[in-house]
Amino acid sequence: MRARRNQRCRRLILTIVAINAAFGIGRAHAQSAEAEKLFSDGNRLMAAGKVVEACTAFEASNRAEPRAGTLIHLGECREKNQQLASAWSAYNDARRLATDPHKLKLVTIKVAALGPRLSYLTVVVSSQVQISGLELTRNGKPFDPTLWNNALPVDGGDYVIAGRAPGYKPWQQPIHVPAEGAKLSVDVPALTRVNSTTKPQVPRVRTPAVSPTPPAVTVPVSTAVQQNVNVTAPSSTLVVVPPLDHPRAPPQTSSGVAPFFVGTGALVLLGGGLGFELWAESTYTAAKSEMTSQLRRDTLYHSANTKRYVAEGLAAAGLAAAGAAVWLYLRNGDREHDATTHASVRVVPMATSISLSLLGQF
């Protein structure tokens, strides 16, 4: 019985392995069909002398399925088009994927031969000009801050380095890089602030002259009564009732100011965290799609991780601020405001007497 059971288990395992292998092969063929078609197009275009179109086809084939052979053809295509930095990057990537000894030897020789011929461009951004919100682009594409102040291998051609920041005038600098053997740099200057617009002067409003109002004296009373007292006095005499010895109630402050500001800060922190998270996702996507330069791919991954850490820190601070705002709101809601007792004395001059009107409430 045990022997039969073992035999059945072995048959079941072999069946599962065969099914997985069959499905795996089907998926591999389905995934490489597009890559094979683009690779064939690249060879046909190279044979026809259409180097630029052939490079585009090889690059698309490598995106569909990275292979050492495709990268070798892409490197040769870039080299014929005098794009030495792109060719060197393709050979480097092929060296990491190559398992065939002949291909590995070929790309190693290519990398060593192209290295001394590369041109380098450094975008210098000193600490004095690194203002908040500064963004740089190279030929219209975002230039990641992790690449600043680094000598990067670039293809020969014309480049435009541009910078911008909120509240500052945009800046740009064109530069031509030779095809090989050049080491150039572009210094980013301090951006100039935009001239602040003058605020329009608000015309002064003149208030018409108003006759002086009779003086009023506020005194506290102990009962909610209203009394009209006529005090006979000469027209030139003013009678004032002195205030009682009750303490004046302290002014009440708004209990919703602190929770409002703390809650606003929480929203700002959470919004900043969300913005950095979206920025990190965009950088991750750019890193995954970068197939020509391993250095740029690694720097993009590092930048995306840094942005994600900042996003997590801002989110944690925002949640803490939101909790503090809720606590302040509930704490202020439990306070009871004591009713205050006040009275007013209005003194109105009359022809033969002074009328005192006392109004008290509690």
Image (cartoon, grey):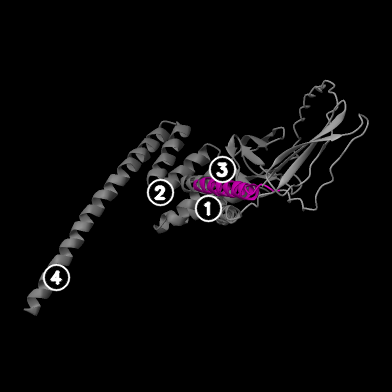
The residue positioned 15% from the left and 62% from the top of the image is 15
What is the magenta range? 252-281
Instruction: Give the side of residue 24 with respect to residue 348, left or right.
Output: left
Inter-mark Cα distance, 1 to 2: 19 Å
| Prevailing SS of the magenta stretch | helix
Inter-mark Cα distance, 3 to 2: 20 Å
Task: Give the position of the N terminus as an image quadrant.
Answer: bottom left
Above or below — where is 24 with respect to 77?
Answer: below
What residue is disc 4 on? 9
Tag 1 or tag 3, which sits nearer the N-term? 3
What residue is disc 1 on? 301
Q: For residue 274: magenta?
A: yes
Q: Nearer the viewer, residue 123 or 253?
A: 253
Label 1 is placed on what type of residue?
A: Tyr
What residue is disc 3 on? 84
Residue at far front of view: 232
Inter-mark Cα distance, 3 to 1: 24 Å
Query: Can you tell which of label 1 and label 2 is closer to the viewer?
Result: 1
Label 3 is placed on what type of residue?
A: Leu
Tag 4 or tag 2, which sits nearer the N-term? 4
Kindly state the secondary structure of the residue where label 4 is placed: helix
Q: State the image coordinates of residue 157 (x, y, percent, origin top left).
A: 61, 35
Inter-mark Cα distance, 1 to 4: 46 Å
Instruction: Give the side of residue 343 with respect to residue 261, left or right.
Output: right
Label 4 is placed on what type of residue?
A: Cys
What residue is disc 2 on? 66
Kindly state the secondary structure of the residue where label 2 is placed: loop
Query: Can you tell which of label 3 and label 2 is closer to the viewer?
Result: 2
